[in-house]
Amino acid sequence: MRPIASRMSVMTGEGALSVYASAKELERKGRSIIHLELGEPDFHPAPPVVEALQRAVREGRDRYCPMAGVPALKQEIADYLQRTRNIQVPADSVVLAPGCKIALFFALMALIDPGDEVLYPDPGFPGYQSITVGFGGVGVPFSLLERNQLQPDPDEIASKITPRTKAIITNSPGNPTGTVYTDNVQRRLAVTDGLCR
């Protein structure tokens, strides 16, 4: 049997899962634990959601859907962005994924060649650096500092852009900080993209 691909040796796991395993072990020993390690809600779906799911399964709506997502849901997301943020996005530009990790993995797989740079927030989700390095890219962190209320500094980001920069990852609300980027920061980051050529 062949060993696993060498790129796997540079990809790291998530510390949150190790903390979760330790917390569950403490629970088994009788300790009361408040779980803050995973972004998992402490409530279950509301009864109307459960009923809608049951109805959909009974009606046979449990098969593959279009790869980019259900058209009606994509349209609703586009409408929601227009209604709540005045952002016009065509529904066919909306892509749905079963979670952030897989969406990030696929996006970076499609964009990153060996040696390409990806700017990412620090502190941030461990997958940013790990997935980038796994595809042969170079992770370049930008700071989220307390003195800036954990907001990214667009000037710092612009100073780190090089001819090898292929992507800038932003995350609002941030993981793990929970910080929501201000409108001013997001607008400045949007124009910073023009430097990334």
Image: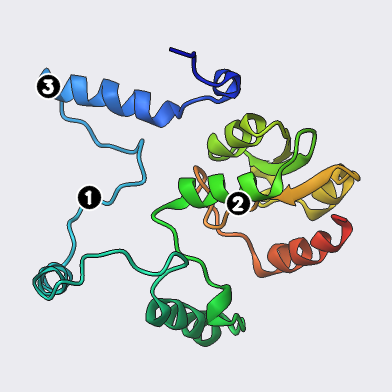
Spatial distance from mark 1 to mark 3, Cα to Cα? Answer: 19 Å
For this view, does 10 lie left or right of residue 13? right
Q: Secondary structure at mark 1?
A: loop
* Depth check, front residue: 194 or 58: 58
Asked if 93 appears above or below 33 in the picture, the reply is: below
> Which residue lies under the disc numbered 1?
42
The quarter of the displayed image where residue 122 is located: top right
Q: Position of residue 93 (x, y in %)?
A: 58, 74
Q: Secondary structure at mark 3?
A: helix
Disc ID at residue 134:
none
Spatial distance from mark 2 to mark 1, Cα to Cα? Answer: 30 Å
If you read the primary sequence from the N terminus, does the residue marked by circle 1 or circle 3 appear first? 3
For this view, does 191 lie left or right of residue 79? right
* Depth check, front residue: 78 or 144: 78
Please tell me which residue is depicted at 65% across the width and 50% down the height of the picture. Answer: 110
Quarter containing the N terminus: top left
Please tell me which residue is depicted at 81% across the width and 66% down the height of the picture. Answer: 191
Asked if 95 appears above or below 138 in the picture, the reply is: below
Spatial distance from mark 2 to mark 3, Cα to Cα? Answer: 39 Å
Q: Position of residue 186 (x, y in %)?
A: 69, 64
Quarter containing the C terminus: bottom right
> Which residue lies under the disc numbered 2?
107
At label 3, counting other C-alpha atoms closer than 10 Å, the crowd grade (few under 14, some 14-19, many 20 or more) is few
For this view, does 10 lie left or right of residue 101? right
Query: Which amino acid type is shown beneath numbered disc 1?
Result: Asp
Please tell me which residue is depicted at 47% across the width and 45% down the height of the picture. Answer: 101
Q: Is residue 190 visible?
A: yes
Q: Position of residue 190 (x, y in %)?
A: 75, 66
Q: Is residue 150 visible?
A: no
The quarter of the displayed image where residue 11 is located: top right
> Which residue lies under the disc numbered 3?
28
